[in-house]
Amino acid sequence: MAHPRLPDPYRRQAQREGFASRAVYKLQAIDSRFRLFRAGQRVLDLGCSPGSWLQYVASRVGADGLVVGIDQAPLVISPQPPIHYLAMDVLSLDLTALMVLSPYFDVVVSDLAPATCGIKEVDQQRSLSLAEAAWACARQVLRPGGHFLVKVFEGPDLKHLIQRLTETFLRCHRLKPRGSRRESAELYILALHQRVGAEAGSRRQ
Ligand SMILES: C[S@@+](CC[C@H](N)C(=O)[O-])C[C@H]1O[C@@H](n2cnc3c(N)ncnc32)[C@H](O)[C@@H]1O
């Protein structure tokens, strides 16, 4: 385990490169492998504060794209187009406010993380509730063929969410990207290519 007082190379790199947080390198690692983002895309970022994923995605989708970030905490970056920020709790999300900005998204990413209490089972459950809320939102706005990336803490109940994603997308991957601390229970589920007809409104579920 890394010594807690050793400087974190990712944090220093983020400061040097002008990113709001070290979290950017996890998304960058996933994107380098799977090529999630392209110019002109519409991307929804759940749990976007302080804003490093917004910065990264904005650079990938460019001026013709759209990046909407939602968080209950304020950003440390100042959002300029293509970035839009909505201050909201994802556990009581107002989809109308979101869909005014765009009725659909090509990619939905969630780096939502709960306030942790140190009790493993409680923290897992809180993380899973946020991941479920992210999926409930993504189901409403993700276009057919679109991708969903979600952070969640490893735990026994995770298999139910993974099963639903496996049914809804062509491919699912469990990822522990570069930059994710080895001692952290977090992992990312990447669900690629939402099956046509699997989006909300086209099926019973
Ligand atoms: C790890 S941080 C995200 C870092 C971000 N990806 C970045 O690159 O800057 C997790 C975020 O989840 C947010 N969050 C946790 N619970 C939330 C909720 N119920 N509604 C909205 N945001 C929430 C926190 O406020 C926090 O900003």
Image (spheres, grey):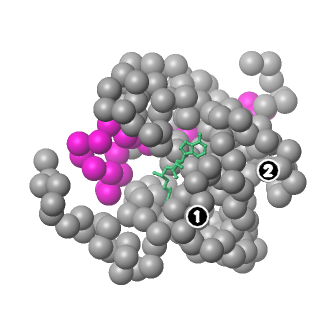
Residue at 47 percent across and 69 percent down: it is 20
Q: CA distance from mark 1 to mark 2?
A: 17 Å
- Where is 155 relative to 74, above or below? above
Q: Amino acid at mark 1?
A: Leu
Task: Give coordinates of residue 12: x percent, y percent.
Answer: 30, 73
- Where is 46 relative to 139, above or below? below
Q: Which residues are magenta?
A: 176-199
Local crowd size for mark 1, using a 10 Å CA cut-off: few (<14), some (14–19), many (≥20): many
Disc 2 is placed on an element classified as: helix
Residue 61 in the magenta stretch? The answer is no
Q: The C terminus lies in which quarter of the figure?
A: top right
Task: Give coordinates of residue 14: x percent, y percent.
Answer: 38, 72
Q: Nearer the viewer, mark 1 or mark 2?
A: 1
Local crowd size for mark 2, using a 10 Å CA cut-off: few (<14), some (14–19), many (≥20): some
Q: Main secondary structure of the magenta part?
A: loop
State the residue position of label 1.
75
Residue at 58 percent across and 54 percent down: it is 73
State the residue position of label 2.
98
